[in-house]
């Protein structure tokens, strides 16, 4: 567990405000005490007066004087008490006002906040689109009619197309019609180009074509809309009145950014940490674990030990022997031992039953080829045999298209074959006892297994039955996946090279079968799905989805697959081909559950990408991370469902992890009102904060363990000093992961604000070459997701403003607050490019960010 800075940042303004509020409350308490003292004095005086009255009444001579004294003194006391009460009420009322003001100032006047307005996010693209889009549609319609007329060269009687053109274009002669068409076409192309004129951080200046058109009413046929059209623009819910849009003020956004960031890498699970001899000791109040920084007080009178929890100050009765006390920050606890312990001196033993299943798309679209420079001999290339057969019917010459004399065309399936063949050779060398299998799919599912048995075919109605497919996968593991790769390599490669492309895409049934097969192997097994298209046959068919309810039903199917894979310790990774849509947004749920990867690559890059996926083996399964922070702190930008204990405990389920898995989190001080309510802490005296990560996991040998890592960080209010020695890589990884989280939830505006705020923050505070290089690496990586989000927002805005248009590929649900511009996740469907960018950003690591994304 690493902090972005070696100290926790506390704002000077917050500390001063806390101090001032504390002093004011002390004065208020003094005033209240004075009031209570006067009331007590009044009660005593009343008692004395009553006694004295009885004595004076007995004397008839002093009766008149007694009555006057009884009447006068209570009124005098009453006036004093009333005066104090009114002053105290004023103080209480002022206190409430100050508290409200403090909370408001804490939210708006934060030293760590980066501010920006909507124009800086590119929101100005919404201003004129509705009106311009309608005019462009009308103009393009006229252009089409003119082109048809010029092409056909015909004249119509009565009301001819020439009359229409002359009326629309101000009586232009036939000799200049072609020029008008070219000019109008140029306008149309320029308008389309303006939509994509967006770069990270700032919308480029755009030409106001409406202003250009105004002096050319007759030339381009532009006319001001009639009153009925204006009313239509104003009240039609599918359009926006441009006059109203121009009046909308720029929206202001703020994002809190500072060095209060922690990073946890799952590579710590393979480190040799201290092994505890007993069970972890938890605080009975906050669930923190006794650690290196915990202090014990010996109670001699009662002969017991008291642990004052450093997280919540709760007193816990404990009993430790000296040898049981933690000696390092990282301590391993074995909660439940494995039934069979792996021989640590024989690392191959741990890989013996691990299964790797390649799930390969062999549908008709996999025959699409791409040119590769040079002449290459490709194994399993059937084109050579086909060409030889065709030569018999020709003159024997090898004819090519112009420019193809030194080019070899390679299909998508051939690229996948080459990539998998290379991985088979590599795994046979490094892990000879692993079991490697192949499942293919087109209009049916074929289980090739390890290549030594007759393939098993699943077709027809079986492709729609979840339970049938699941049982088929389990049985296939027992029948067709029995031998390790060192014995099956030759057979497996023969079956691989003999694959041919044809048919549709039964992606869902094939993935379920492959997961069921891998689930019968040891924890750490994996499934790698290689596809280029949308599932359109059988279970999980995405080709006939027309409503959000239908899409949610499909989501549940893939969620069910992912949950089972996670429970079995199976990692599912997806490799899709660029240029084709396969609905990554839905099938990536499998990778979300299992800690797998999602790649969208060019066919020629498949070898490198599949190798990268297999290069990081699973370290642990069923991983759950619980992070505990001090009671005076709280998490920032986290899902409330993942928080507990007054926002001091963060819980994340990671599923399967490898050494490249990293998570980050941000924290900040609680608001001043809550801090003042905590009588057992004093912010002015706090010199350090404790942080603790409790990582519960199942090791590959089946043991259930907990790794407890505790850090103690000093506090500082010197922001410049902290930024000078801050780790910009950790800050950058956190910024990208947070951006992905906001985008994944459908809050595109907040995602862009977050990315821009961190970019400004790092740029302003970078002070040496190393930090400048980290800044460039950060921007090189964040640009991809930022631009994908900007394009999605632009497309969504344009489609919503087009008259009568509707987006069939994406369905959005907007909140009742129109200013929030939040699209709620669940009804938001992303295209493959955005889905891939969001997933890649979610899995960003320090190692990845150091490689600039070009």
Image: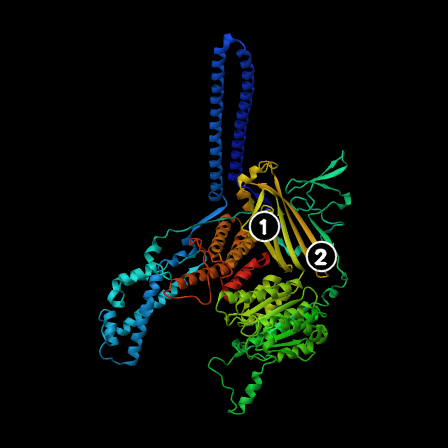
The reply to whether discs 2 and 1 touch (Cβ–Cβ < 8 Å) is no
Identify the residue at horizontal 64%, vertical 48% (top origin): 692
Q: Which mark is residue 643?
A: 1
Residue 850 occupies quadrant: bottom right
Q: Considering depth in this image, is 538 or 408 the residue closer to the camera?
A: 538
- Sequence order check, earlier mark of 2 and 1: 1
Residue under label 2, please give it.
Answer: 704
The residue sitting at 55% across, 17% down in the picture is: 50
Apparent side of residue 516 relative to residue 258 in the rendered image (left or right): right
Q: Residues within 10 Å of mark 2 (few under 14, many from 20)?
A: some
* Disc 2 secondary structure class: strand
Q: Secondary structure at mark 1?
A: strand
Q: Position of residue 109 (x, y in %)?
A: 47, 42
**Residue 802, horizontal then vertical, whole percent:** 37, 64
Q: x and y percent of residue 564 in the render?
A: 64, 64
Labelled disc at residue 733: none
Residue 300 is left or right of residue 584, and the answer is: right
Residue 726 seen by the camera? no
| 266 in relation to 400, above or below | above
What is the crowding at mark 1: few (fewer than 14 residues within 10 Å), some, or many (at least 20)?
some
Instruction: From this view, report whether residue 822 is shown above or below residue 444.
Output: above
Q: Nearer the viewer, mark 2 or mark 1?
A: 1
Quadrant of residue 461 within the rendered picture: bottom right
| Protein image colouring | rainbow
For this orientation, the residue located farthest to the top is: 61
Q: Position of residue 57 (x, y in %)?
A: 53, 12
**Quarter residue 229 falls in:** bottom left
Query: Which of these two is toward me, 239 or 751?
Result: 239
């Amino acid at each position: 567990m690493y902090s972005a800075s070696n100290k926790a940042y506390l704002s000077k303004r917050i500390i001063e405000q806390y101090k001032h509020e504390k002093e004011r409350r002390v004065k208020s308490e003094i005033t209240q005490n004075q009031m209570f003292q006067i009331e007590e004095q009044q009660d005593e005086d009343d008692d004395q007066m009553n006694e004295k009255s009885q004595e004076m009444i007995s004397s008839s001579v002093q009766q008149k004087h007694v009555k006057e004294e009884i009447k006068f003194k209570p009124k005098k006391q009453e006036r004093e008490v009333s005066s104090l009460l009114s002053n105290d009420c004023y103080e209480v009322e002022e206190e409430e006002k100050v508290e409200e003001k403090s909370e408001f100032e804490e939210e708006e006047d934060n030293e760590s906040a980066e501010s920006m307005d909507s124009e800086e996010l590119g929101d100005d693209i919404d201003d004129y689109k509705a009106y311009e889009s309608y005019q462009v549609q009308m103009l393009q319609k006229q252009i089409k009619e003119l082109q048809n007329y010029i092409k056909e060269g015909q004249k119509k009687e009565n009301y001819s197309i020439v009359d229409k053109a002359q009326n629309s274009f101000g009586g232009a002669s036939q000799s200049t019609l072609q020029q008008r068409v070219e000019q109008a076409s140029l306008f149309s192309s320029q308008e389309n180009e303006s939509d994509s004129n967006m770069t990270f951080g700032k919308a480029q200046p755009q030409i106001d074509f409406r202003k250009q058109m105004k002096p050319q009413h007759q030339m381009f046929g532009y006319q001001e809309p009639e009153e009925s059209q204006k009313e239509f623009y104003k009240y039609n819910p599918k359009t926006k009145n441009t006059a109203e849009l121009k009046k909308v003020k720029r929206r202001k956004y703020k994002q809190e950014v500072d060095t209060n960031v922690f990073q946890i890498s799952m590579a710590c699970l393979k480190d040799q940490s201290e092994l505890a001899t007993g069970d972890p000791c938890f605080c009975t109040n906050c669930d923190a674990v006794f650690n290196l920084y915990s202090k014990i007080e010996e109670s001699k009178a009662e002969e017991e030990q008291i642990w004052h929890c450093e997280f919540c100050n709760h007193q816990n009765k404990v009993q430790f022997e000296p040898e049981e006390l933690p000696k390092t920050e990282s301590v391993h606890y074995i909660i439940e031992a494995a039934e069979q312990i792996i021989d640590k001196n024989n690392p191959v033993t741990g890989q013996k039953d691990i299964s790797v299943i390649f799930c390969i798309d062999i549908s008709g679209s996999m025959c699409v080829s791409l040119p590769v420079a040079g002449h290459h001999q490709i194994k399993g290339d059937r084109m050579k045999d086909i060409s030889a057969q065709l030569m018999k019917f020709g003159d024997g010459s090898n004819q090519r298209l112009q420019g193809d004399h030194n080019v070899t065309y390679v299909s998508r399936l051939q690229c996948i074959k080459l990539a998998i063949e290379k991985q088979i050779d590599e795994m046979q060398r490094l892990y000879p006892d692993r079991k490697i299998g192949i499942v293919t799919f087109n209009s049916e599912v074929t289980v090739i297994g390890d290549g030594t048995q007759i393939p098993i075919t699943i077709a027809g109605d079986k492709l729609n039955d979840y339970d049938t497919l699941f049982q088929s996968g389990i049985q296939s593991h027992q029948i067709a996946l029995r031998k390790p790769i060192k014995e099956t390599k030759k057979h497996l490669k023969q079956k691989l090279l003999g694959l041919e492309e044809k048919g549709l895409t039964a992606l869902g049934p094939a993935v379920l079968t492959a997961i069921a097969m891998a689930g019968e192997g040891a924890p750490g097994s994996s499934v790698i799905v290689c596809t280029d298209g949308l599932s359109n046959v059988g279970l999980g068919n995405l080709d006939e989805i027309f409503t959000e309810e239908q899409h949610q039903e499909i989501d549940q199917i893939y969620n069910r697959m992912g949950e089972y894979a996670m429970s079995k310790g199976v990692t599912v990774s997806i490799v899709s081909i660029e240029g084709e849509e396969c609905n990554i947004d839905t099938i990536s749920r499998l990778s979300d559950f299992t800690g797998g990867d999602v790649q969208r690559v060019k066919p020629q890059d498949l070898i490198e990408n599949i190798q990268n996926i297999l290069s990081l083996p699973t370290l642990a399964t069923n991983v759950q991370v619980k992070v505990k922070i001090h009671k005076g702190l709280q998490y920032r930008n986290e899902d409330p469902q993942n928080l507990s204990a007054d926002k001091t405990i963060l819980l994340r389920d990671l599923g399967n992890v490898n050494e490249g898995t990293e998570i980050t989190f941000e924290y900040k001080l609680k608001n001043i009102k809550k801090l003042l309510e905590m009588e057992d802490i004093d912010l002015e005296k706090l010199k350090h904060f404790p942080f603790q990560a409790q990582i519960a996991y199942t090791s590959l040998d089946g043991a259930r363990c907990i790794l407890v890592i505790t850090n103690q960080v000093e506090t500082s209010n010197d922001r410049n000093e902290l930024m000078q020695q801050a780790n910009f890589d950790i800050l950058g990884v956190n910024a990208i992961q947070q951006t992905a989280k906001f985008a994944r939830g459908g809050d595109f505006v907040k995602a862009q604000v977050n990315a821009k705020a961190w970019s400004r923050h790092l740029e302003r505070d970078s002070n040496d070459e190393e930090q400048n290089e980290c800044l460039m690496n950060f921007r090189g990586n964040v640009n991809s997701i930022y631009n994908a989000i900007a394009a999605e927002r632009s497309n969504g805005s344009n489609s919503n403003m087009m008259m009568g248009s509707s987006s069939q590929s994406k369905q959005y649900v907007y909140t009742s607050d129109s200013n929030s511009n939040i699209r709620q996740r669940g009804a938001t469907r992303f295209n493959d490019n955005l889905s891939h960018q969001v997933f890649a950003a979610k899995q960003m690591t320090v190692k990845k960010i150091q490689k600039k994304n070009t």
